[in-house]
Image (cartoon, helix red, strand yellow):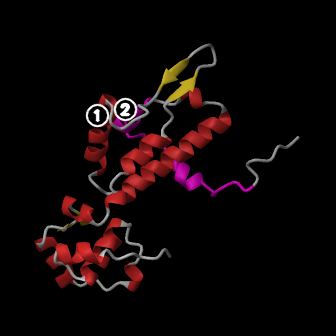
Amino acid sequence: MDNITIPVDDIVENKISINEYLILYNIANGFVITGILESSIQALTGLESKGFIKVSKEGVFLRDKANVFFANNDDLFVKWLKTYPTSVKKKFDGSRALSPADPDTILGQKLRKKWESIFKKDTQKQQLAIRVLELEVKDKTKSGDLEYMVEATRWLNEGFHEKNSYLLEQDTGENLYGNEDYM
C-alpha cells in the first residue's frame, strides 16, 4: 500500500477531522483502505452535511468541494486522452486523425463534457475505461489493426468502454517477453 500524506492545513481550513479526511481519501481512491478504516454513519453524514460527499442508493460519491484534497485524481480525462492515439497511418497513403492532442482544444473540451456526462465523477469507471482503451490500443497495435480504431468522439458516444470490456477478462497482465523476437 502507498503512504498516505495528510494535508493538515487543508483539513484545518475545511474544518474536517483526520478520520473524515481518510474517508474522503478512501472514496477518492476506489475504496483502497476500506478494510483498515472504520467509517461510521455519523462520519458519512457529517461529510455529507459539509458538502464533501453525496450518499445515495447507488453508493457514496465525492462532490466538487472534495477536490481541494484530491486534485490529482480529478483529471482522469486527460490520462484517457493521452492514451488515445492522436492519429493513425493508413495502409494506402496518409493518416487519419482520431483525437485532439490537447484537452484545451475545442474538440478536447467537447470530449471532456461527454466524459463527465458518462462517468459522473465515478473514478472506478473512469479507470476501467482507461484500462479498456489501453488494452484495445495494445491489441490493435499487435494485430496491425490500429488503422481501424474509431475516433475518440465515437468511442465515447457509442460506449466502446463497455463494448470492449471483454478485453479486461482476457488481460493476463504485462507480457514479460514482449520485447523479445522469436523465430
Q: Badge 2 is on which residue?
A: 153
Magenta residues (range)? 151-176
| Residue ID at (61%, 13%) | 93
Q: Pick whichever of labels 1 and 2 is earlier in the sequence.
A: 1
Q: Position of residue 76 (x, y in %)?
A: 38, 51
Mark 2 secondary-structure assignment: helix
Left or right, 15 with reference to 106: left
Mark carried by residue 99: none
Q: Hey, which quadrant is residue 20 in on the image?
A: bottom left
Can you name the residue that lies furthest to the left here? 49
The amino acid sitting under disc 1 is: Lys
Left or right, 178 with reference to 43: right
Label 1 CA crowd tier, 10 Å (few <14, some 14–19, many 20+)? few
Label 2 CA crowd tier, 10 Å (few <14, some 14–19, many 20+)? some
| Residue ID at (48%, 74%) | 2
Looking at this view, is 177 or 107 the one in front?
107
Q: Hey, which quadrant is residue 100 in on the image?
A: top left
Task: Measure the alpha-carbon separation of dots 1 and 2.
Answer: 9 Å
